[in-house]
Structures are given as C-alpha cells and as structure tokens.
Image: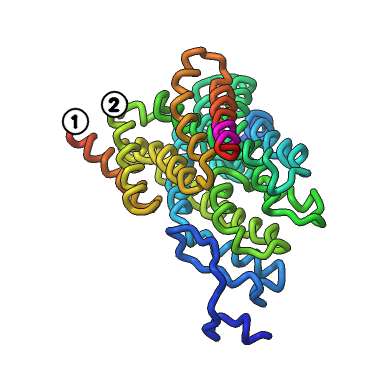
Amino acid sequence: MRTLTDRTSGRVMPPQPIAPGSRLSLPALDSPRWQSPARAFAWGLRSIASTVLTLVLFATYLGIGALAHDTGFSLGWVLASTALVWAGPAQIILISTLGSGATAIQAALAVTVSAIRLFPMVVSVLPMIRTPQTRRRDLILPTHFIAVTLWVECFRLLPQVPRERRVAFTNGLGIGLQSVCLTATTIGYGLAANLPQLFGAAILLLTPLAFLLSTARNCRQVSDIAALALGLALFPLVSLLHTGVDILISGVSAGTIAYALHRWRERA
Amino acid sequence: MSSFIGEGQALLVLVLAGFLPNEVWRMLGLWLGGGVDEGSELLVWVRAVATAILAGVIAQILVFPPGALLSLPGPLRYGAVAAGFAVFVATRRSIFAGVVCGELVMFAGKWWLG
C-alpha cells in the first residue's frame, strides 16, 4: 500500500481543489506524511511560504512596529500587541487612538467595532477545522489565530489536509505567520526613524489592496461576490448616518441581501 | 524587563483596550458557532456577512484613510485599488500581480502629482 501513496511512484493524483496561485503542493490526503500531528503542524508552518499574503503581512507589521515607535510605545508592548491582538486594523486603531490621547475606554470601543468581523469569520472556519471528536479547548488556539489571512488561507488549504490533522495544521500556519509578524514588528520598530514618508502611505494602502484581492479570490458562490460588491457600495452610504457601528449595519444588510440573492437563484 | 514592556499600566491598557475587546468576538464565535454544521445554509449567510463586513473595512480605509494615506488624494487611492483589482482579474486571480500593480500606480500618481 505504501508505494501506492508514495508521491515518487508517479501515481496519478485525484483532482484536488488547489486554487490558482498556490505554489506549495501538500501531500495527498492519504499520504503517510500526515501520520502525526507534529508533521501536520510542520506542513502548516511550511505553508506560509506558499502565499504572497505572508509578504503583505510582513510589510504591514513593519508599519505597525514603526507606528508604535513613533507613538512612544515600548518594543515589548507592541510585540505583546501583535501576539495578543493579532489583527492589523485593530492594532493600528489601538496605537493611534491611545497615541492621540484618547482614554482606554474610547480605544476599547473603537477596537471592538473593528473586530466584529472576526465573529462571522470564526463561525464559518471552525466547522472546517473540527471533527465531531474535537474538544472545544483544542480549538481555542486556532480560533485566536483567525484573522483575514488565516481565514482566506484556511479555505484554500484545508481541503488538502486530512480532517483529523486540521487543528495541528492550522496551529502551524498561525504560529508561522505570527513569527513572521513578530520579526517584522521588531524590524519596523528599529527602522522607524529611517523610513521615508511615502513608505507609510504605501504600507497603509497594502491593507485594502490585500483584503480586497484575497477576499475576491475566496469567493466561491454568487452570494460571496454579491456580498463583496454590495459591502463596498453600502458602507459609504451608511457612513452618512454616523451611527458608530456603520460597518456592522452595512455588513449585515449587504450580507443578508447577498444571501437572499443566493436563495432566489437556488429556487429559480 | 520593565523597560522592555514599559510600565505595568501600559500592559494593562493593552489587555483591557486591545486584547479583550478584540478577542471577545473570536471567543463568541467559538462558543456560539461551535455546533454549526459545515454544509448548512446558515453558514452561507454567515460567510456573506463576514465578506460584506470585510468589504466595509476596505471601504472605510479608502473613504476615511488613516494617517499617511490621507496624503494621497481620493481619486489616487480609488484608482490604485481599482487598477490592482483589474490586474488581479486579468492575471487569473494573482494577488501578487494585483498588489504590485496597485502600489506602482500609487507611486506613479504621487510622482506625477509632485
């Protein structure tokens, strides 16, 4: 049986749902290379080399390190924020609101509004990661790692990972990405004063570019495409209301309209 | 060690104003979404809402830009992202090509505007 699953045997592999642009090929689902959680963890770690989003994160966290330096936070503080918060927009909001003299309560409110998106992301990714036997506490660490990048990469990579190894794989991917970002935070913190001003604008432009393109690549159904387009269009309108939770209102409305479109098409 | 982290108070602010208000949404997702079935219709709606909220975050950064991004005029911000998206579509969904193109358009526009 072993030769059958050996990749060097030239066995024709079953078609795998590999998204365009993926450079790393993971072992076949029944390969002995998945036999232990430690190996799955290592494959997860290695997968950070298969996505350009790792580079985008690196540059974003260079910017976050530099921003923290210029705002007067210590290196240890900003490293702790990268490990604990693990969401670029929330960290930028936290550092810039605290730096502008806002109270901790004002900063906490701004951060929590920006973090609402994590809730539906976690709800939609976890069913892919767990098995019926998975204990909830084993899901705490993978849940902590979920942010835009991991959300997108899980949809791309997890179908290529045996289900019982997905927790270990996701932990490897998450720890790999965090290591890259902790390194970038440190380098950005050290470089801060030497970075040209245009660099700041270039890094801040990376977030919307990478969020838009990775979400677009992640679109599988009509409802996803409609949600992306409607979400972009509705936010500027809803923001005229100045409710403080504009993103939540535009997101839930656009998402629900997109879902209605999906139901309507299914029925037609 | 105290100079590495800063005062204990700064760390307390990080936990109370940064970590907890952010993490609560992940843990709520774990707690409430624990029993959702992978093939369920509910997940289609949840995915659509997650995508639309993310689209809102993208629009917010472009319409109300933070910090240094404010130094770019609006049409340049929208143009750079639109060009990046066009190249992404033209290259059969290459995120790399799209991101590089968007950034190049931004640099070119900035240079052209002086």
Vertical order, A172 against A11 (above or below): above
Question: Tag 2: Cα neighbours inside 10 Å, few (<14), some, or many (≥20)?
Answer: few
Secondary-structure class at tag 2: loop
Residue located at (52% from left, 29% from top): A93
Q: Which mark is residue A146?
A: none
Quarter containing the N terminus of chain A:
bottom right
Where residue A183 appears, as percent x and y from the top left, is 51, 52
Vertical order, B19 against B70 (above or below): below
Labels 2 and 1 share a subunit = yes
Vertical order, A86 against B22 (above or below): below
- Tell me how the rendering is colored: rainbow
Q: Which residue is mark 1?
A: B113
Q: Quadrant of residue A191?
A: top left
Question: Tag 1: Cα neighbours inside 10 Å, few (<14), some, or many (≥20)?
Answer: few
The three-letter code of the residue at mark 1 reads Leu
Residue B58 is inside the magenta segment: no
Quarter containing the C terminus of chain A:
top right
Residue A262 is inside the magenta segment: yes
Residue located at (76% from left, 56% from top): A131
Residue located at (45% from left, 36% from top): A67
Residue range highlighted in magenta: A258-264
Query: Can residue B103 be seen?
Result: yes
The three-letter code of the residue at mark 2 reads Pro
Q: Which residue is mark 2?
A: B73
Subunit ID for the residue under disc 1 = B
